[in-house]
Amino acid sequence: MASRLGELKEKALREVKAIDVVGLCSKLVRARSENPPGDVSEAAGVAMDWLSEHGHDVRRLEPEPGRINVLVDEGRGRRCLLLMGHIDVVPAGDMGRWSFDPFCGDVRGGRVLGRGSTDMKGGVACIMAVFHALSGLLEEFNGRLKLALTCDEETGGRLGAGYMAERGLLDADGCFIAEPSTPYLAILGERGLCWLKLVARGRPAHGSVPELGVNAIRIAMEAVDKVLALHGREVEAPGEIRDVLTGMEGLIEAASDVLGLRPEVARAFIRACSRITVNVGTI
């Protein structure tokens, strides 16, 4: 079994290496998709044309004019892997401050130049290539494979990932996201939020005789202290998740230069994954 998986891996890698990923990234960069305003028609067209030319049935979802999401769903197995990325980019801003055309897509010094080449059209080109390579192996794995390219990530995602998730189109057993702007290498779950609003009521009295009243501020302070006592409390997690977190700490710290993180920041992220954190907002 292990040797067969190795053969399939090598086959997939050969398929990926045969694809001009750099050229695809350049085409995507040249297709302007600044958000705001959010029209990704050109970039979506590049992606859909490429996928269609490579034999894939592409589904186009457009909740509003120009806000286009691309979906490909292949295979018939029970378990499903989702490859996902967004095709909108933040605005280029003042064009006069660029030393090159931010939508040139030129390759210089081994890099693709242009707005969105990192976040995240480079990643999108990669997952498109991987999707195509893996799609030819689906019969070997008896599974499903999805590719989702979304709009609207840079302004909240309501018309992109939100729109697709609400309709069950992103349902999967696992997901790879080629997003470069996060320190997380693997996500097995997500921390929840517990927003608390505390109201303390007192009884006024003259400042010289506070014992005749009830100080609402002191009551609020005592309540905040009790909530802060939860900070840093370790959460009981399954053994395999603890193992992943332990492994990630060393990996992220070793890769902190590549990720642009100071080692202490990387460690703080990992600690936050396994502990309760408390932040006091406005009093």
Image: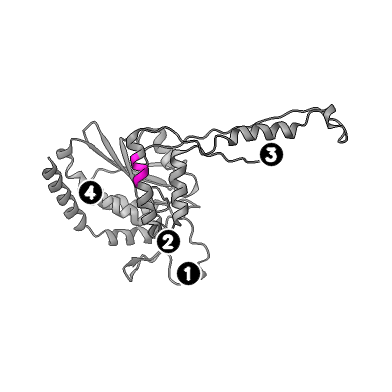
Is residue 66 rendered to the left or right of residue 225? left
Query: N-terminal of the two: label 1 or label 3?
Result: 1
Q: Residue under label 2, please give it.
A: 115
Q: Which mark is residue 132?
A: 4
Percent position (x, y) of residue 277? Answer: 52, 39
Residue 140 visible in the snapshot:
yes
Q: Residues within 10 Å of mark 2 (few under 14, many from 20)?
A: many
* Type of amino acid under label 3: Ile
Q: Nearer the viewer, residue 186 or 128?
A: 186
Q: Which residues are magenta?
A: 243-247
* Type of amino acid under label 2: Arg
**Could you tell me how far apart the alpha carbons at marks 2 and 3 are, in whole angstroms?**
41 Å
Q: Magenta span has 167? A: no
Q: Residue under label 1, please give it.
A: 98
Q: Quadrant of the C terminus?
A: top right
> Given contact means CB atoms under 8 Å apart, are the residues at marks 2 and 1 in contact?
no
- Where disc 1 sits, the SS reads loop
* Type of amino acid under label 1: Trp
Q: Residue under label 3, please give it.
A: 283
Residue 85 visible in the snapshot:
no
**Could you tell me how far apart the alpha carbons at marks 2 and 1 are, in whole angstroms?**
10 Å
**Could you tell me how far apart the alpha carbons at marks 1 and 3 are, in whole angstroms?**
44 Å
- Where disc 4 sits, the SS reads helix
